[in-house]
Image: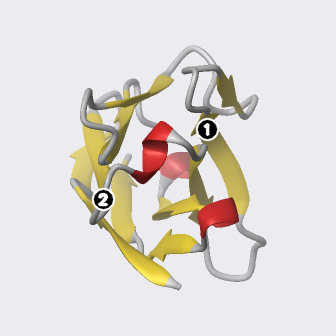
Amino acid sequence: QVQLVESGGGLVQTGGSLTLSCTAPSPIFALNAGAWYRQTPGKQRELVASITPVSKTTYSDAAKGRFAVSRNIGNTIIYLQMNDLKPEDTAVYYCSAALAGYSGRGTQVTVSS
């Protein structure tokens, strides 16, 4: 699979914010939906948010009201703005454009209590 590059993860306190970025080598998000997933040890990877080429967005119940997914004008980056972070948001966050065969290696988000 062609690699996407996630960035923006880190350590933040409860209630803090982070913005993750997922950068593609070409404007794939013009024609392909992009998605953010997260995974913690021993658990299945779960969908957090997705955005379609026409900017239709979907969110997990855990993400609704706190996270926002968007993309840049050039359709090479999708973002995940995360607000009011909680310790249970701690995970490795991955992005993908699965139908196009793109995925990333993830970025760690750690929320301290």
Which of discs 1 and 2 lies nearer the camera? The answer is 2
> In the image, what residue occupies the spot 78% across and 71% down?
44
Looking at the rendered structure, the kind of residue marked 1 is Ala
Q: Is residue 67 left or right of residue 101?
A: left
> In the image, what residue occupies the spot 30% across and 45% down?
77
- Asked if the residue under mark 2 is in contact with the one under mark 1, i.e. CB atoms within 8 Å, the reply is no
Residue 36's place in the image compared with 71, above or below, is: below
The percent coordinates of residue 46 (x first, y second) are 72, 57
Q: Secondary structure at mark 1?
A: strand
The percent coordinates of residue 111 (x first, y second) are 37, 51
Question: Foreground: 36 or 45?
Answer: 36
Which tag, 1 or 2, sits closer to the chain's start? 2
The percent coordinates of residue 12 (x first, y second) are 24, 47
Looking at the rendered structure, the kind of residue marked 2 is Ser
Q: Secondary structure at mark 2?
A: loop
Assess disc 1: are there few (<14), some (14-19) or many (≥20) residues with their C-alpha within 10 Å of its C-alpha. Answer: many
The percent coordinates of residue 26 (x first, y second) are 30, 59
Cα–Cα span, label 1 and label 2: 21 Å
Assess disc 2: are there few (<14), some (14-19) or many (≥20) residues with their C-alpha within 10 Å of its C-alpha. Answer: few
Question: Foreground: 102 or 107?
Answer: 102
**Residue at mark 2:** 26
Q: Is residue 64 left or right of residue 91?
A: right
In terms of image quadrants, where is residue 71?
A: top left
**Residue at mark 1:** 49
> In the image, what residue occupies the spot 46% across and 24% down?
68
In terms of image quadrants, where is residue 33?
A: top right
Residue 40's place in the image compared with 51, above or below, is: below
